[in-house]
Image (spheres, rainbow, N blue to C red):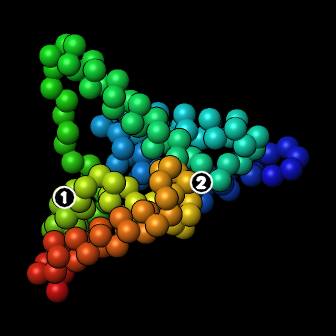
Amino acid sequence: MHGQTTDADWRIWLEEHSAKLWLFARQKARSEADAEDLMQEAIIEAARKSNGLPAPSMVFGIIHRRAIDWARREARRATREGTVINDAPIAWFDVTSEQRERVQLIQQALNKLPENQREVITLKIWGDLTFSEIAEALAIPSNTAASRYRYALESLRQLTKEVLA
């Protein structure tokens, strides 16, 4: 973007992209507070690098890389201190009580996917990224992103076929 980025530009950008980024950050972080920090830091870094409004794929990529770095630091710290890291599954959706049982089964299916498939599903479906953008964000080939997506969809079909039929 050329020229000065205004507060209005940022409000529009955040309105359009924050929910997608938040879901991805929540998936990558161990708590909502960590996810919030991760998302904010990634947006700031991307804005600095792009000198204005960043491409969402750039922010997803920064979230991904920072989460890996954070997890490595936490694992080293836990090893040093002899503590256990809590890997409680994330809550993917906010739901009404009528939807709760069905959503819980879908969440369980999503949580059973390998992490690399889960992140591609998140970026493709909720992040609305192309396979090229996913590849850029995760530093993988575009064909690998597409394959992980296909494998994830097939796994989800198998895991949910009785429940959602």
Work out which quarter of the rendered image holds the C terminus and state it.
bottom left
Is label 2 in a helix, a strand or a loop?
helix
Q: Within 10 Å of the Cα at label 1, are there few (<14), some (14-19), or many (20+) other Cα atoms?
A: some
| Residue 113 percent location from the top left of the image | 23, 59
Residue 82's spot in the image, x, y percent? 15, 16
At horizontal 65% and vertical 53% (from top left) the residue drawn is 55
Residue wearing tag 1: 112
Q: For numbered disc 1, what is the local secondary structure?
A: helix
The mark found on residue 97 in the picture is none
Residue 110: horizontal and vertical position, in percent? 25, 61
Q: Is residue 3 above or below residue 127?
A: above
88 relative to 95 in the view: left or right: left
- Please tell me which residue is depicted at 80% across the width and 45% down the height of the picture: 5
Q: Which residue is under mark 2?
A: 56
Which residue, as the protein is rendered here, is positioned at the far top? 81
Q: Earlier in the sequence, mark 1 or mark 2?
A: 2
- Find the residue positioned furthest to the left: 162
